[in-house]
Amino acid sequence: MNVPTRPGLDLDQVFDAYFAEIHRYIARRLSRDDADDLAGEVFLVAAGGGYEPSRGDVKPWLYGIATKLIARHHRSEIRRWRALSRTAEREAQSHEDTTLARVAAGRLTGRLAGALAGLNRGDRDVVLLVALAGFTHQEVATALEIPYGTVASRLSRARKHLRLALGDVNPLKEGHDG
C-alpha cells in the first residue's frame, strides 16, 4: 500500500526499523491481538504527518502515537465493560458473559496490575514507557510531548505510589534518568 508521507520521512524505512518494537510495547500493555491492530494504526497515523525532524529521533514520536492509541483503546474497553456490567445487573448472566468476566478478571489480577491501575493515566504512561520501552526521561518527554521536569515528577510520584501498593518494593530501578 502506497501511503503519502512528508518529504524527508521514509515511512517504509521507519516501519521496517520500528514496527516489531512498537508491536511488542503495545502487546505488553494490552494483548497480542490488540497489538496486531494498533501497531499498524500507529504507522497509519504516522503516515498522516506530524513528525518534525527538529524534535529529534522519530522513535519517541512513534511511541507517543502508540501511547495515545492505547489510552483510546483503554477508554473504549472501560466503556464496553461498564456497559456489560450494567447489562449484567439487569439480566441474568449467560455462560458467555460469565466466561468473559472471568477472563477479564484474570488479566487484571496481581498486586502490580492493581497498583498500575491506581495510577493516574499520565503517571502510568510515564512508568510504562520507562519500564516497557526502556526510555530515558528525555525520550518520554518527547513521546508524550511534555516537559522533561514533568516526566521526573510523574515518575517520582508513581514510584511512591507503587512502592506503597507493593509493600515498599521498588518497582523501577532508581536513577534511570537519561
Image (cartoon, rainbow, N blue to C red):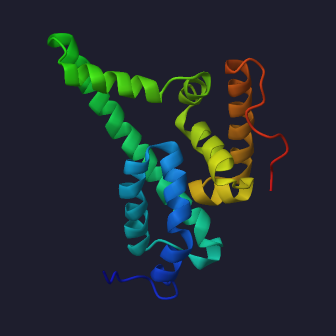
Q: Locate residue 19, reporting x and y percent.
A: 50, 67
Residue sticking out furthest to the right: 175
Number of marks in the image?
0
Image check: 79 left or right of 21? left
Residue found at the far left of this picture: 91
Is 95 left or right of 25, judged from the image as shown?
A: left
Camera-side residue of 25 and 162: 25
Quadrant holding the N terminus: bottom left
Camera-side residue of 69 and 122:
69
Q: Residue at x 56, y 25 (%)?
A: 118
Whole-percent x, y for residue 169 in the image: 77, 25
- In the rendered view, tell whether residue 99 sits above or below residue 68: above
Residue 78 at what x, y percent from top left? Answer: 35, 31
Residue at 60%, 67% (x, y): give it. 59
Left or right for 30, reference 131: left
Quarter residue 56 falls in: bottom right
58 above or below 149? Answer: below
Extreme-bottom residue of the structure: 7
Residue 39 spot, x, y in % from top left: 43, 60
Does 118 appear above or below 89?
A: below
Q: Residue at x 80, y 56 (%)?
A: 178
